[in-house]
Image (spheres, rainbow, N blue to C red):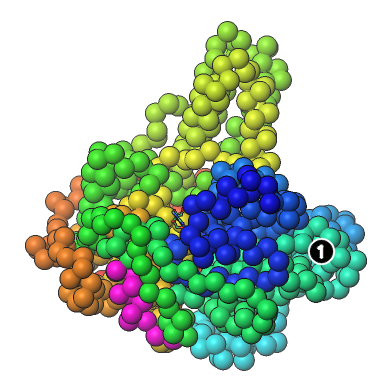
Amino acid sequence: VPPDADAVLEGLDPEQRAVATALHGPVCVLAGAGTGKTRAITHRIAYGVRAGILRPDSVLAVTFTNRAAGEMRGRLRQLGVSGVQARTFHSAALRQLQYFWPKAVGGELPRLLERKVQLVADAAARCRIRLDRNELRDVTGEIEWSKVTQTVPGDYAAAAVKSGREVPRDPAEISQVYATYEELKRDRGVIDFEDVLLLTVGVLQDRYDIAEQVRAQYQHFVVDEYQDVSPLQQRLLELWLGERDSLCVVGDASQTIYSFTGATPDHLLDFRNRHPQATLVKLIRDYRSTPQVVHLANSVLAQAHGRAAEHRLELVSQREAGPDPSYTEYGDEPSEAEGTARRIRKLLDSGVPASEIAVLFRTNGQSELYEQALADAGIPYQLRGAERFFERTEVREAGAALRGAARFGGNDALLDDAVDVPSQVRAVLSTKGWTNQPPAGSGAVRDRWESLAALVRLAEDFARARPQATLADLVAELDERAGAQHAPTVEGVTLASLHAAKGLEWDAVFLVGLTEGMLPIAYAKTDEQIEEERRLLYVGITRARAHLCLSWALARSPGGRASRRPSRFLNGLRTGSAAAAAPRTSSVAGGVERAPARNRKPRGPVLCRVCGRTLSTAGEMKLMRCEDCPSDMDEGVYDRLHTWRAHEAAELGQPA
Ligand code: ATP
Ligand code: MG
């Protein structure tokens, strides 16, 4: 083993080293949050590559969200490893499908359907079934669920009943709409988001030659967050693997949060049964969080039930003590958002960078209030993960404009050559309406401004590192980064759903909206569903390195009826054993923190996050996008399901 390979093992504990050096045969890592699972597998890849055992381009590392895939790529880059594919299941499948489609089917891969809800509406109309807006959204959710669980229209009714789902309409009607939707898609030559995995599985199953070609390319597989693998993803993984067994999976059964799509921790917990020769490693040392945060996480798990809970591992913090978690009750939701913004301001003033702070909520519908409060307080924030940076419309447009300017720069009065590269970039972006000052509003407009501001900062860094470089050099750098998905860090407080936050970490985490109806969410009824909500809280808590602030509001709007109760999951945490270890910063103990009555500033029009059109209906404003625009595909199908659910929950939260 070359000495520089051994250097990769420094900074790993003995169990993590066992993972990193087990380069032959199957490996399974069962471990709690923050114990270094992702670190162990990225070091494993780096060690294997440096030791000459793994060829970088023969490794496929998969995970579940774009943010997490980006995090993995970032860590590999830091370890000096390039050429490894670290992707989501979906993006890995899409890439393969695009490549093999002409050979497998002929022609180009059909377009991805953009207006799915509209197509479901058309299908319902064709079946002469009237659906109101909410039903339409729910039926669309049911179709997505059916597809990720590989349920065909004919089996939908039975499967829905078996899974204990609350079905928005007569299952026979839904199955009819589902079948017609599939027909319409075929007629119009489009595929939807879920088809990408289904078709990839289909091609690999039917075409042995293509499967062999994929297998010749990828020989080693690593799966992070394996507890959330769906049956379809598991099938895809098996097809990729074929007869081979170079598969390393890591996961934490207590973080299973996608079971509504058919994911179960069984694949993780039964891995040893399927692969008796597998190396099994358990990690319990928590390197991420302070003892206070770890204690709270352990306390939440101590109350959990079910198969995942039977396998829980008590975490042991490796860090020094930090601040105690705080619990804050607010009178109403806008006060909660403003109070959160005030506390974020304090953290920023005390030197915590914005990129080290996150506000996490249960449903995407909750983000708008926080966007507004942060925008009002002049605090930068980012809603979308940095990862899809180069795919954002505004970034692609800016890239094209910069490319044009670099090519024809001499003819453009705006672009004087001695002028430095960042000023040239600002000049080009100003033709797209960009100014140095952030716009007043929040939402899509602000989000776009932040993307372009990140481009300007990138140009500034670039010019500092290479003072002689020209605009053309910068364009080449942008192209290279886009190819490697090496996005600039977008500086700002992260606003994200709990589902999208998994695998990530911040110095300070605000868990907001912790009321009955939100967490657990109103539609969680069965014991299993409640347990999944509890696991979401565990995921949220374990994102924090040091500062953890939990909060909730008693009423929806100022002066509204105080109809909300704090989440049942907080019972015993505030008063029981957890309080003993993490005592009393709680403003609950000292009374309720109430913000002064909110001055509602008149807002400008609310724009669709996706297409930028002015939104008109209350429902659309809640979604922050047109009814029939696709939601940001960042987190894929799961996130979209939650967007729909968010709407539902927001309705339920209305005071009577
Ligand atoms: P999650 O379950 O949330 O995905 P994880 O088990 O994947 O967590 P990591 O994200 O890999 O955990 O690690 C958590 C943090 O602890 C990271 O900041 C990582 O760099 C740090 N860490 C992990 N192992 C060690 C170690 N041996 N020494 C120092 N720091 C470590
Ligand atoms: Mg991880």
Q: Is residue 276 above or below residue 251?
A: below
Q: Position of residue 383 (x, y in %)?
A: 45, 50
Residue at point 70%, 58% (across, down): 60
Residue 621 part of the magenta-drawn span:
no
Q: Does residue 302 appear to the left or right of 526 in the view shown?
A: left
| Most distant residue in the left direction | 590
Res 401 visible: yes
Q: Is residue 525 above or below residue 37?
A: below
Residue at point 33%, 73% (across, down): 298
Instruction: Indicate the quadrant where residue 555 lies.
Output: bottom left
Q: Is residue 566 above or below residue 605?
A: below
Q: Position of residue 10 (x, y in %)?
A: 52, 51
> Can you identify the residue that label 1 sits on?
215
Residue 304 part of the magenta-drawn span:
yes
Which span of residues is magenta-colored? 295-306
Is the C terminus in the top left, top right, bottom left or bottom right quadrant? bottom left
Q: Is residue 556 above or below residue 447?
A: below
Query: Magenta part mainly helix, strand or loop?
Result: helix
Res 188 visible: no
Q: Position of residue 318 (x, y in %)?
A: 35, 60
- Name the foreground residue: 103 vs 39: 39
Q: Secondary structure at mark 1?
A: helix
Instruction: Indicate the quadrant where residue 296 lies.
Output: bottom left
Residue at point 16%, 60% (across, down): 585
| Most distant residue in the top direction | 418
Q: Position of residue 215 (x, y in %)?
A: 81, 63
Q: Amino acid at mark 1?
A: Arg
- Name the foreground residue: 598 vs 253: 253
